[in-house]
Amino acid sequence: MLAVGVEKQLGALKLDVKFEAKNGATALFGPSGSGKTSIVNMIAGLVTPDRGAIALDKTVLFDSGAGIDVPPHRRRIGYVFQEGRLFPHLSVRQNLDYGRRMSGVPRDDGEFARIVKLLDIGHLLDRRPGHLSGGERQRVAVGRALLMQPKLLLLDEPLASLDAGHKREILPYLGRLRDDAGIPIVYVSHAPIEVRRIATTVVRLDAGRVVATGGTELLKDAEDDIFA
Amino acid sequence: MFDLSPADWTAVELTIRISIVATLCALPFGLGLGWLLARRNFWGKSVLDGLVHLPLVMPPVVTGYLLLISFGRKGPIGALLYEYLGIVFSFRWTGAALACGVMGFPLMVRPIRLALEAIDRKLEDAASTLGANRGLVFLTVTLPLALPGIIAGVVLCFARALGEFGATITFVSNIPGETQTISAAIFTLTQFPGGDAAAGRLVLISVALAFAALFASEWLSRRAAIRFHGD
């Protein structure tokens, strides 16, 4: 379980949030500029909160009071970025292997084959990221994060840069992922349709604060965007 | 035409050796300084930037003279190096390599710095979330992505070293077999009647070396580009 309670001043926005994410998918849902990405960056260790604490299971990742701040490379948190951020100089296979090698996870061909099959990326392994479509790129990014055997998976608007067709293509994979991964997933989105499909818990944010926590019924009043 | 005398060959061999040593010794400093200028903000950064570029705009003779009074046997740095490490620069080929390295240094730092500035820092963040510590991020992401710029810097520094004349001759003179590079040998040959044929041969060698360096750099950067954009 992930427990977050942090504060940070971001320009004019005062971020002050508290929530928990259990197994299954927790959606951070809110309009652009509500601080969603900053929150996941703090969980990953890329941004340092001004005050507060972040704990994953029994491990404290950050505690301003106790002076604890585990660096990102030792947090073992899989992070799928909005723009994929695949390494352009490495093949898809090397990208997939990168997190496993850097985290010192022993090679496991069975697990590799399972993830490749789950995301249906077997035919892409020898290509370079520059030769992939947006949807393919994001599936590889998800695979790369999973293969480091993370204790938590962060997905920051993984579909935002894709067109409607590619979004529809990826959503089923993400659903499968939620049911198979066995770790908490934090899913950032401002699109109700995605959140309804993926999330088991919804944390609704506005202007840097949690305004509601609950199930997908929180999205009743949310307007869908054009793609549905 | 190409019946080079042993003395000519010595100058050619010496030029290549001096240029390679100068470039290889400059590279770690070039990487360090390029990184510092691209990534860090500190007091005196623009002064440091100016100092690095100074050999590019100063007369080479002035650079050579400054090297002479600081790295000569009696110079403050030269004396220390001799006393503690036994390194002598003055009137040795090592001094020529130092002069060539200093002259080529700004040409090396600039492309490295630009390449490092152009790298998407978000890729480095991604690498750190995947378990790579700072050293591994640098080795596996930063360095390979900056490779085209590093190659460009190495080639420019090497080419500058091949042709260096003013700073070298001021600092370590023009001693055949020790500090007399192709450029210095050509200069010497043109000072005496009857040296034209020998000078002409060295000029041709010089042109061939320059072309070889250009082709090598073209080939290397094409290979680096293929690494990025795939097959």
Image (spheres, rainbow, N blue to C red):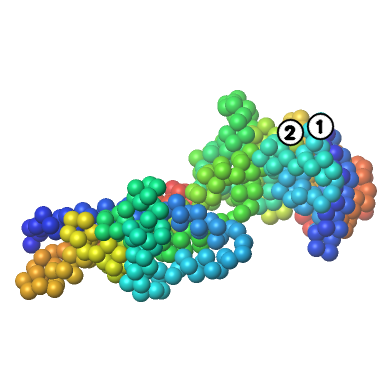
What residue sits 26% from the left and 66% below the top? Answer: B169
Subunit that carries the residue with mark 1: A
Q: In the image, residue B78 lies at what x, y percent? A: 37, 57
Between residue B175 and residue B219, name the one nearer to us: B175
- Within 10 Å of the Cα at label 2, are there few (<14), some (14-19), or many (20+) other Cα atoms? some
**Among the two numbered marks 1 and 2 on one chain, the one whose residue lies closer to the N terminus:** 1
Labels 1 and 2 positioned on one and the same chain: yes
Q: Label 1: state its secondary structure.
A: loop
Q: How many marks?
A: 2
What residue sits 57% from the left and 65% below the top? Answer: B45
Q: Which residue is mark 2?
A: A151
Q: Which label belongs to residue B119?
A: none
- Within 10 Å of the Cα at label 1, are there few (<14), some (14-19), or many (20+) other Cα atoms? few
Q: Which residue is mark 1?
A: A57
Q: In the image, residue B64 lies at what x, y percent? A: 33, 67
Q: Amino acid at mark 1?
A: Asp
Task: Give the distance between the C-alpha atoms of the residues marked 1 and 2, in whole angstroms.
Answer: 9 Å
Res. B207 image quadrant: bottom left
Res. B170 image quadrant: bottom left
